[in-house]
Image (cartoon, rainbow, N blue to C red):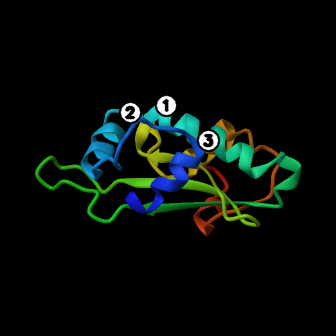
Amino acid sequence: IAARLPQLYALRRPRWKQAPAHTAIRYTLQGLDPADVERAFRDHAAVLAGSPADRTSIALDGKTWRGGFDRFQDQKALQILSALTTDRTLILGHVLIGAAGKSHEIPAAQQLIHELGLTGRLFTLDALHCQKNG
């Protein structure tokens, strides 16, 4: 944090005399609403990505979080689906698989494409998305 403090002072003038401790930043991030952070993240990524016509193709890929399970609570491992541009390697958004009734990757991908307004684009996905009825 201290290494990047001069850049922060160049962008803004915080009233800190020294860089905040990592625990202060952690507590601040934990207090944020995840939905608001995701919305801000997606808005920022959309600005960086440019217009939809500029994006050549979009890759969608699901990953299982290592250690994202709880045997005592009988919870399965967390899975997340990410959308990213292939030409700029920019992440456009995420959605948790299993959240909001999405039991597997196919409906989660459909939801993410709709939420990001990416209909009509060229996508690269895993072979499991080649099912006739998904």
Going from N to C along the chain, the mark reached first, 3 or 1, is 1
Badge 3 vs badge 1, beta-carbon distance below 8 Å: no
The span from disc 2 to disc 3 (Cα, nearest Å) is: 16 Å
Q: Residue at x 47, y 32 (%)?
A: 35
Q: Which residue lies furthest to the right in this view?
A: 53
The span from disc 1 to disc 2 (Cα, nearest Å) is: 8 Å
- Residue type at mark 1: give it: Asp
Q: Which residue is drawn at 27% across and 50% down?
A: 21
Residue 113 coordinates in the image, percent (x, y): 67, 44
Which residue is labeled 2 in the image?
32
Mark 2: secondary structure:
loop
Which residue is labeled 3 in the image?
42
Mark 3: secondary structure:
helix
- Label 1 Cα neighbours within 10 Å, binned few <14 / some 14-19 / many ≥20: few
Which residue is labeled 1 in the image?
36
Residue 119 coordinates in the image, percent (x, y): 78, 43
Q: In this view, does 26 lie above or below 35?
A: below
Residue 75 coordinates in the image, percent (x, y): 23, 49
Badge 1 vs badge 2, beta-carbon distance below 8 Å: yes
